[in-house]
Image: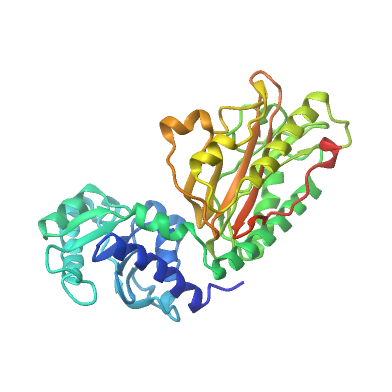
Amino acid sequence: MSEPEGGLELQRLARLQQHLVATDCDALLLYDPLNVRYATGTTNMAVYSLHHPCRYALVPAEGPVTLFEFKTCEHLSEEHPAVGEVRNAVSWYHFITGPRTGEFADRWAAEIASLLGSSPFRRRGTQPRLAVDRLDPLGLWALGRCGVEVTDGGEIVGLARAVKCPGEIAAIRSAVEVCERAIAAMEAACRPGITEQELWSVMHQVPIAGGGEWFETRLLTSGPRTNPWYQECSDRVIREGDLVAFDTDHVGLGGYTVDVSRTWLAGDAKRTPEQRTMYAAACEQVQRNTELLQPGVTFAELSERAYLPPGELHSEANACVAPGMGLCNEYPLVLNRELFGNDGYDGVLEAGMVLCVESLVAPVGWPEAVKLEEQVLITPTGPELLSKSPVCEALLS
């Protein structure tokens, strides 16, 4: 699959600008490479630019985007209709500027303020209002000295990205299909004697060869390393009868993330009663909670109705019913009911949202855990399962 077609890029930009106008902002400044990609369709050294702010985009409330690109990389934005102009980025992080960081931040802010004072960026007759997704203090102060009012752009981007247009849904389907070929290859390689890291390398090879991009985590563990969860893969050798659990967290084709979890039984050993109990509980949780993903349901209703495994089978480490998914994790995040009151927020499920329904059964003191997760599209008539990788019959039957 190639980079998204112009139609998709313009649809995403239109959604972003719709939310930008609703907040009465002149423009939106984006540094997060995923947000830059959403607005422009372009990508360049995405992982590098996650921790080095070396490229950014200025999105007006109307019209094409000005992309500030890493020097000598202007050619990367060719044939991307959302981009109207490409300029060299002005970087002002210490690695690049050393003791001159403040000077370069002022230079950067002056250029941004100059653009905001011109058409099509200027929508209001008062002080220009700029929404920003990420900004270090020196930049905030420099924009203030230039007379720019700065507001948070996180909500603007989050709401825009939450509902997928048809082109995005097609791209997500393709990303899932490629990633699940990798899951099948990894399942075939999952045998006693292989290390966790060796097995995880299979997951890397297949989707990268198919056009995928990177992995957000290395969450694959076996046997006693599955519990507690949130350990990354190691050189431990997988043994006969071990549970092997993983979470893909793969940024795949077109930048769309595939977040699917499976747990397998290694080798030909029979499952233990504890393994069977945990696996059945995880399957029930995922199935029942998937059925609740109906358009019009509020986050509070979903949290309250969501099924939790009984007693000690429910793990506090499994904090959410379902997170949103698109270009990585996206709004919304629906927490379990024991956390919703203090830490959650309300909203409404809409057709076009993609969420991942999670289960982690990791009883305290038990030798192993089970992790399952499915990627689900909310349609006008209810949930559609996007992930198709089979369950482990050896644990369930």
Which residue lies at the image location 24% right of the left edge and 53% below the top edge? Answer: 151
Q: Residue 328 at x, y = what percent?
A: 51, 53
Q: Residue 347 at x, y = what percent?
A: 45, 47
Q: Is residue 97 above or below residue 190?
A: below
Q: Nearer the viewer, residue 113 or 292?
A: 292
Q: Nearer the viewer, residue 177 or 240?
A: 177
Q: Is residue 208 above or below residue 344?
A: below
Which residue lies at the image location 61% right of the left edge and 27% below the top edge? Answer: 315
Q: Residue 322 at x, y = what percent?
A: 56, 43
Q: Is residue 249 visible?
A: no
Colour style of the rendered protein structure: rainbow
Quarter of the picture containing the N terminus is bottom right
Q: Is residue 25 visible?
A: yes
User: Residue 241's image quarter?
Assistant: top right
Q: Nearer the viewer, residue 193 or 119?
A: 119
Number of numbered discs on residues: 0
Q: Is residue 356 above or below residue 76?
A: above
User: Does residue 155 appear to the left or right of 237 in the view shown?
Assistant: left
Quarter of the picture containing the C terminus is top right
| Farthest-out residue, top | 365
Q: Residue 376 at x, y = what percent?
A: 63, 53
Q: Is residue 11 above or below residue 184?
A: below
User: Residue 365's image quarter?
Assistant: top right
Which residue lies at the image location 56% right of the left edge and 30% below the top edge? Answer: 317
Which residue lies at the image location 79% right of the left edge and 32% below the top edge? Answer: 239
User: Does residue 239 appear to the left or right of 132 in the view shown?
Assistant: right
User: Does residue 397 appear to the left or right of 166 in the view shown?
Assistant: right
